[in-house]
Image (spheres, grey):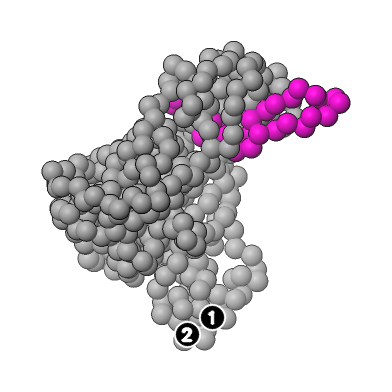
């Protein structure tokens, strides 16, 4: 059977853990080239992939392989030399496995960076050493802060074009660190690199002996990403109810799903939300075996001592740390759909495994990422906008604040007509307080959606 020692062994497994990270930066800062260099120098590129890149590079009149083409997979990206969509790549070293998201740098693709960084534990923000911190750099730092990305790397790229000058790097690192720290970014690591030449990407640079820190890959391999799940409250969204009703298991009733956060133990007193009914964990089944303890993000089946009415979308949580439920949600959102989000709009709200009807009651403000100012009462949010909203749901939901839990503090707004994802939301105050909290709410016509 599992014991508490198993939780500790997971924490100590950083050398073989999985790191999800995203790259971001302004256009032509070298994001895709950096990713291509990481893949190439870590021997994560297959021979036929490299041959295809070499062929494409020759067709563009380039003598050396353009490593950016390893991630710019869309034909439009290759033709324009820019990144449009989020390109996901998997690679591994002996020390760690990686899933990277190469995100676009254009302003109109801010929503794509939100997509790529939403599950990232680390964000690499590139800056062209010749240009320093620019408007788009500040946008990306703000998005990383909004999404509570725990680790941010400032990669000052193209150091070869400024003669590897230490003062240039130091000035950029100080400006960015000061700005990002003011947003609440918890950890910032600055690394001077040349993605094209390979300086400080995988191997240390002989051209920058004044820098004594890690290379990009060394930092990616060693940054701590496995936190103690015991520090977080237990949250278990029910995905499926298992009732085989066979002769062998006539009374079996289990609740299957993935633990969103924290730890569950046999004997824990638990509350089922939103009903508020209570019970005790009788057993936990993982991979067909009974265990005493399970933790996020394990997929398990939980059995309770009482016959409680539970269905998909309910949340099982230890009673001592149960969240409050509410039908009124205030959140920071990034609007990702081409159609605008308006006051009074009827939507579906998906939180973990639960989907309920909702109405957008108010849009108090829209965030201007250029200077972090708030535009009060914009009336609507369009694609790539980040703003504050107030939503009323048809049924109570148990949301944590996004600042406390990225998994159970996030949600999606969905168009009920065709299932299109409209908005990615972060419950509570995910960034800065809205400047227009006093803006009057606009009453919506609730006919047919009476809640």
Image position of 274 with respect to 106: above or below:
above
Which residue appears at 46% of the width and 29% of the height?
A: 274
Question: Residue 182: image x %, image y %?
Answer: 19, 42
The magenta span reads 231-260
Question: Which mark, by number, is residue 56?
Answer: 1
Q: Is residue 438 left or right of residue 188?
A: left
Question: Which mark, by number, is residue 60?
Answer: 2
Task: Tell me which corner region of the image, top left, top right, bottom left or bottom right, holds residue 267.
Answer: top right
Image position of 449 with respect to 408: above or below:
below
Identify which residue, 183 or 280, lies in the foreground. Answer: 280
Identify which residue, 292 or 308, lies in the foreground. Answer: 308
Q: How many marks?
A: 2
Q: Is residue 172 left or right of residue 300?
A: left
Please tell me how crowded label 1 is: few (under 14), some (14-19), or many (20+) other residues with Cα within 10 Å. Answer: some
Residue 123 in view of the camera: no
Q: Are marks 2 and 1 in contact (CB under 8 Å)?
A: yes
């Amino acid at each position: 059977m599992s014991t508490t020692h198993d939780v500790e062994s997971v924490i100590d497994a950083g050398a073989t853990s999985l790191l999800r990270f995203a790259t971001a930066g302004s256009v032509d800062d070298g994001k895709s080239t950096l990713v291509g260099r990481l893949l190439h120098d870590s021997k994560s590129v297959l021979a036929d992939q490299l041959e295809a890149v070499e062929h494409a590079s020759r067709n563009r009149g380039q003598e050396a392989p353009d490593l950016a083409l390893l991630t710019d997979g869309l034909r439009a990206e290759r033709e324009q030399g820019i990144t449009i969509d989020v390109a996901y790549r998997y690679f591994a070293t002996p020390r760690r496995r990686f899933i990277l998201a190469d995100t676009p740098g254009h302003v109109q693709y801010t929503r794509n960076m939100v997509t790529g960084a939403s599950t990232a534990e680390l964000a690499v923000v590139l800056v062209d050493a010749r240009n320093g911190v620019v408007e788009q750099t500040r946008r990306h730092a703000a998005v990383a802060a909004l999404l509570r990305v725990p680790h941010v790397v400032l990669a000052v790229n193209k150091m070869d074009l400024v003669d590897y000058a230490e003062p240039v790097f130091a000035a950029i690192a100080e400006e960015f660190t000061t700005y990002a720290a003011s947003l609440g970014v918890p950890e910032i690591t600055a690394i001077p690199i040349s993605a094209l030449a390979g300086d400080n990407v995988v191997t240390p640079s002989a051209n920058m002996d004044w820098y004594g820190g890690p290379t990009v890959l060394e930092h990616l391999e060693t940054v701590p990403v496995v936190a103690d799940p015991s520090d977080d409250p237990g949250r278990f969204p029910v995905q499926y109810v298992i009732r085989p009703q066979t002769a062998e298991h006539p009374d079996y009733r289990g609740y299957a799903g993935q633990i969103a956060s924290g730890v569950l133990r046999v004997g824990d007193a638990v509350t089922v939300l939103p009903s508020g009914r209570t019970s005790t964990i009788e057993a936990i089944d993982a991979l067909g075996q009974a265990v005493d303890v399970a933790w996020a993000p394990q997929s398990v089946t939980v059995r309770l001592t009482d016959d409680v009415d539970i269905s998909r979308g309910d949340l099982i949580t230890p009673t001592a740390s149960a969240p409050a439920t509410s039908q009124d949600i205030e959140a920071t959102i990034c609007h990702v759909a081409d159609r605008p989000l308006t006051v009074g709009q009827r939507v579906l709200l998906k939180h973990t495994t639960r989907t309920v009807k909702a109405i957008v009651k108010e849009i108090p403000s829209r965030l201007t990422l250029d200077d972090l100012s708030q535009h009060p009462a914009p009336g609507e949010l369009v694609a790539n906008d980040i703003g504050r909203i107030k939503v009323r749901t048809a049924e109570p939901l148990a949301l944590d604040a996004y600042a406390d839990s990225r998994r159970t503090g996030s949600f999606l707004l969905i168009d009920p007509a065709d299932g299109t994802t409209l908005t990615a939301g972060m419950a509570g105050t995910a960034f800065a307080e809205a400047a227009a909290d006093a803006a009057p709410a606009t009453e919506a016509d609730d006919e047919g959606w009476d809640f």
